[in-house]
Amino acid sequence: MPKDDIRAFLGTFAEGFGFRDRDKLKFAPDDELLQVYRAQYPVKDKCSRYREAMTPNNAFESDRGPTSLARPSHRMLPADPLPRLAGIAVLRRLEVSDLAVFQEYRHDPLIARYQDWYGTKTDAEASAFLAKMNALELLQPGICSQIGIAEPDQLALVGDIGLTLAIDGKSAEIGYALRPEAQGRGMGAAAVREVINLVFEWTDAERVLGIVDPLNVRSIRLLERVGMRMIESRSGIFRDAPCIDHVYAILRRA
Ligand SMILES: CC(C)(COP(=O)(O)OP(=O)(O)OC[C@H]1O[C@@H](n2cnc3c(N)ncnc32)[C@H](O)[C@@H]1OP(=O)(O)O)[C@@H](O)C(=O)NCCC(=O)NCCS
């Protein structure tokens, strides 16, 4: 491979992790890049982030009116924000034991119609993915985590929500899917509302984004139901073909 191509690739890679371009040649082949990143940019203490986010009206509008953020009265937050009650649903960690249900809905052509899921095609891949998501620290900049949506009684998995905090920490993006049996009950909207709460409570992000195909009417209804509004229509690529993406957003309330 030509030297310039390698340099260009390393530049993109370094940039993706928030390093300066001139530092791209300082990495050794056996560096654990994430550890280097964390040493350089330590994750802010959850407790201080939480306090920074505390304002008297820190709530967001939904179709059910303003929802107060459920803040614990004690000063320290637990290390993991999950599990978390989301009204008629629960947000919880994905488990390897979710494999059968997870694979069933992700392989349903109607559920997968507007989404591409990488790295979960085979059972072995999906199993490794579930194990990874079970342990992954949420809300690390630039790293997508997948959160399970579950029934509140037995915590049976009904869907999942992908959550990515942008590298600059200013926004977070969500994507979601519900197994068909769980649709039409408001569980998706309840789960998305609570993930929005979680983002505003645990990070300094100013807005949460959802990107949707204009033909995905049910998803658009969900986004609008939780108080998101369309801010942009832009061209994209989906399955190697041009497409239009509608970008929805909800802002942190002052
Ligand atoms: C997008 C998706 C999650 C929406 O599921 P959903 O169940 O329609 O969404 P909600 O949780 O908002 O539920 C709303 C429905 O429940 C009904 N409902 C019943 N009881 C309810 C309650 N107590 N509270 C709220 N809604 C309730 C609502 O009337 C509404 O049905 P309607 O749209 O037919 O009027 C689902 O269609 C899906 O998984 N699609 C495939 C994956 C996908 O495309 N993801 C989005 C990628 S951007």
Image (cartoon, helix red, strand yellow):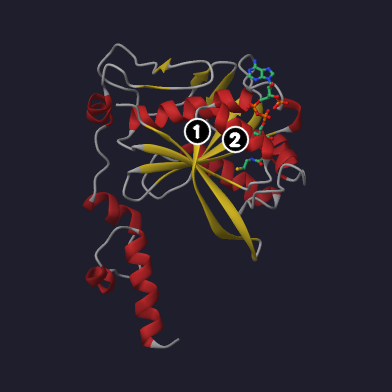
Q: Nearer the viewer, mark 1 or mark 2?
A: 1
Mark 2 residue type = Asp
Marks 2 and 1: in contact by CB < 8 Å? no
- If the image is split into quadrants, where does the N terminus sit? bottom left
Name the spot of residue 71 as percent of width and height, x first.
35, 16
Q: Which residue is mark 1?
A: 228
Name the spot of residue 74 as percent of width and height, x first.
28, 13
Say which quarter of the image contains residue 75.
Answer: top left
Badge 2 crowding class, 10 Å Cα cut-off, few under 14, some 14 to 19, many 20 or more, is many
Residue 180, above or below 83: below
Mark 1 residue type = Met
Q: Which residue is mark 2?
A: 160
Q: SS at mark 2?
A: strand
Name the residue nearer the viewer: 20 or 134. 20
Report ligand 1 position as a quadrant: top right
Name the residue nearer the viewer: 30 or 4. 4
> Gap between marks 1 and 2, in whole Å?
19 Å
Q: SS at mark 1?
A: loop
